[in-house]
Amino acid sequence: MNIRSDRLSQVIEIAEKAGIIAKRFFCSHELKKSFKSKCDLVSEADLTIEKMLIESLKTVDDIEFLSEEFNPGTSLAAPCWIVDPIDGTTNFVAGIAPFAISIARYDGCGVDLAVCFLPVTNEMFSAEKGRGAFLNGERISVNRDDDPINCVGATGFADITQHGGTGTLPVFCSMVQKTRAMRRLGSAVTDLVYTACGKFAFFYEAGLSPWDVAAGSLIVKEAGGIVTDFSGGNDYILGKTIIASNPAMHDFVKTEIADSLQRTKI
């Protein structure tokens, strides 16, 4: 049974309202968009939903905010909301799903509440620290795949698209030969929650920001998964590398990343 705290129930309701706004923009043929830089796209929907989230979440807990468009430099030294109004903006603007709304509450030490909503498929993922992870109110868990050749994994290329160079491309080239399939959905939040509910055995990516991973990482952990940075440590929120996986596949993914990146240096 999913016994939600009042705070989580409020955040889920806010995410649902944000999803209504997102779907309205998603179906619009006149969506305004601009480029903050050569690679960074922002839409009218991002800004509208972010404003709504900030105003609404303040009524739940009046703490600081960390998000891509609002106070992106906020430190994690004190409690704050970590928000991504639309994760997968490129998908969103192109009229492609998935994209996701991500909300995490950071208590000063770690994430203690998370909500990730995929409006198109109406998938509401949620978790509170120590209380398990849920999809539309039903408990979820990572899968038990333990052989790479039977696994479907996920990745993204934020390190390449944002900074140029080869980045983790060699890792993908190796992974795709050793697994059943690799997928690149274009939304790190979706990759994380789909790992949490067992659709993917693992997900890894470099070059991500706190708003990309904060909420999804708690959902994976509460679903029985393992979340680390590429070295196996805990610096995945600020450290820009993340591995999220079921327990059986974590060592394989970590080793494969290390070996593939090392080979490119030789």
Image: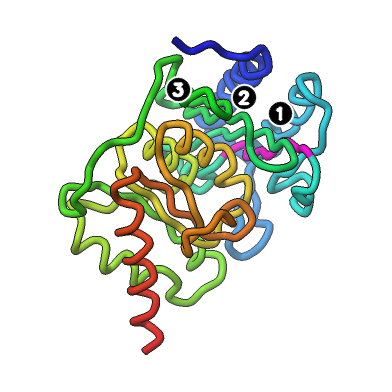
Q: Earlier in the sequence, mark 1 or mark 2?
A: 2
Magenta highlight: main SS: strand
Q: Is residue 101 magenta?
A: no
Label 3 sits on residue: 134
Q: Residue at x 43, y 45 (%)?
A: 226
Quarter of the image for residue 264 reads: bottom left
Label 2 sits on residue: 18
User: Amino acid under label 3?
Assistant: Phe
Q: Which span of residues is magenta-colored? A: 79-86
Q: Earlier in the sequence, mark 3 or mark 1?
A: 1
Labels 1 & 2 near each other (Cβ < 8 A):
yes
Residue 170 in the figure: left or right of residue 14: left
* 24 versus 148 height, above or below: above
Q: Residue at x 56, y 54 (%)?
A: 234
Frontmost residue, 158 versus 265: 265
User: Amino acid under label 2?
Assistant: Ala
* 233 versus 29 height, above or below: below
The x, y position of residue 73, in whole percent, is 77, 54
